[in-house]
Amino acid sequence: MTEKIEKVVLAYSGGLDTSVILKWLIETYDCEVIAFSADLGQKDDFEAVRRNAVNTGAAKVYIEDLKETFVRDYVFPAFRANAIYEGTYLLGTSLARPLIAKRQIEIAHREGADAVSHGATGKGNDQVRFELGYLGLDPHIKIIAPWRQWDLNSRTALMAFAEKHGIPVQATRAKPYSTDANLLHISYEGGILEDPWSAPPEDIFTYTVSPKDAPDRSECIEIAFEKGDPVAIDGERLSPAAMLARLNELGGKHGVGRVDLVENRFVGMKNRGVYETPGGTIMRTAHMALESITLDREVLHLRNSLLPDYSRLIYNGFWFSPEMEILQGMVDATQRQVSGVVRVELYKGNCTVTGRKSDYSLYREDFATFENDEVYNQQDAEGFIRLNALRLRIRKMLES
């Protein structure tokens, strides 16, 4: 027997899956469905999304511009930690899901809905990210995950359902892979990319030009940071979303930020993904360069030791967990003096640091110089070395 549901808030993109889900929810539960679409910079035609939702039967449609919130409250905190999953993935999709889940729960409370729903499949990470977010914010909310319930288990079945109910999803027919886009990145998975030996076709890329076709002349830019966050490019102050958009434009022009990887999903399987993250790649490179002169050695090493766990929490969907709160607090404490300017050079897929400066710099040329100095006694190094070698000497003496 189907559980009684009165009203559902659905994370709705307007594509094949969520359009079918909207109608399926109405038919299966005889309930109202509120469609919610988050504008995170994916450049969708949101008026068309609204029309499709209404025509498919949505009782109400929420379309919200969350680009500034996304970058300020999700992307920037993660990049203050230099977050990266398995050494390669800059977490573009992972960072978007908790924001969408949070707004769904807020809309559900506002509208008196008793359930939320999403279009993630039972094989992927997103089902975990959405639902950990839901339950971390409302422990009593009902969750409907159609891909784990229905018998529409193929693209052919979804298309047949759509055609039967007059759902306009013709644009989804020709795409031989799945994508997820926002202001931080765009991902490509499945279909023609499922063979990890096959190179991704050049025509799938949309955020970046091929490094082979990038300009033959490099471009240098200066990025200013305040407390770990980028605030200006070449002296022009920008909002968080405008900052990332500008870096995307600059990086994309020079072919920066392409990644082809096989990652370990939280649910247990390996998955091949192709990503474009031009602005994020530049931002992370510049941020690490600034930290190299502003962070104390032991603080830097301690923060970096937390990076794998921090990144894994984001990837696995634990953004709203107590351990994440603690780690974020520690990360933010390290950023109090990470302010200054970094110069990077963009050229044919590369982002190279060529300068960094800060009023809080711990780098002292008078200590580091190879020329004559009056501040460092090189003879002090002998005692330092012998004390550090003491345990090694004792160990070797036992073998004699």
Image (cartoon, rainbow, N blue to C red):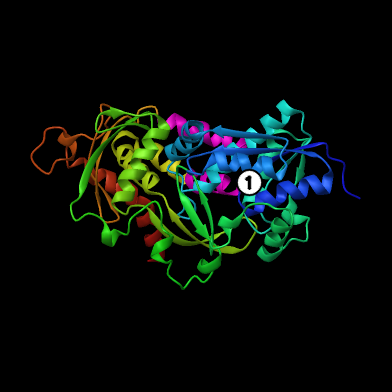
Residue 59's spot in the image, x, y percent?
A: 73, 35
Q: Which element carries disc 1, helix, strand or loop? A: helix
Quarter occupied by residue 366: top left
What is the tally of numbered marks visible in this picture? 1
Q: Residues within 10 Å of mark 1 (few under 14, many from 20)?
A: many
Q: Residue at x 39, y 64 (%)?
A: 202
Extreme residue in the right direction? 1
Closer-to-camera residue (99/398) = 99
Residue 354's spot in the image, x, y percent?
A: 21, 44
Q: Main secondary structure of the magenta part?
A: helix
Residue range (magenta): 306-335
Instruction: Look at the picture and state if 140 lies above or below 175.
Output: above
The answer to whether residue 158 is left or right of residue 349 is right
Q: To which residue does mark 1 refer?
A: 129
Residue 110's spot in the image, x, y percent?
A: 71, 26
Q: Residue at x 17, y 42 (%)?
A: 378
Instruction: Look at the picture and state if 261 lies above or below 95.
Output: below
Q: Is residue 318 magenta?
A: yes
- Quadrant position of the C terminus in the picture: bottom left
Closer-to-camera residue (44/112) = 44
The answer to whether residue 293 is left or right of residue 25 is left
Residue 134's spot in the image, x, y percent?
A: 69, 38
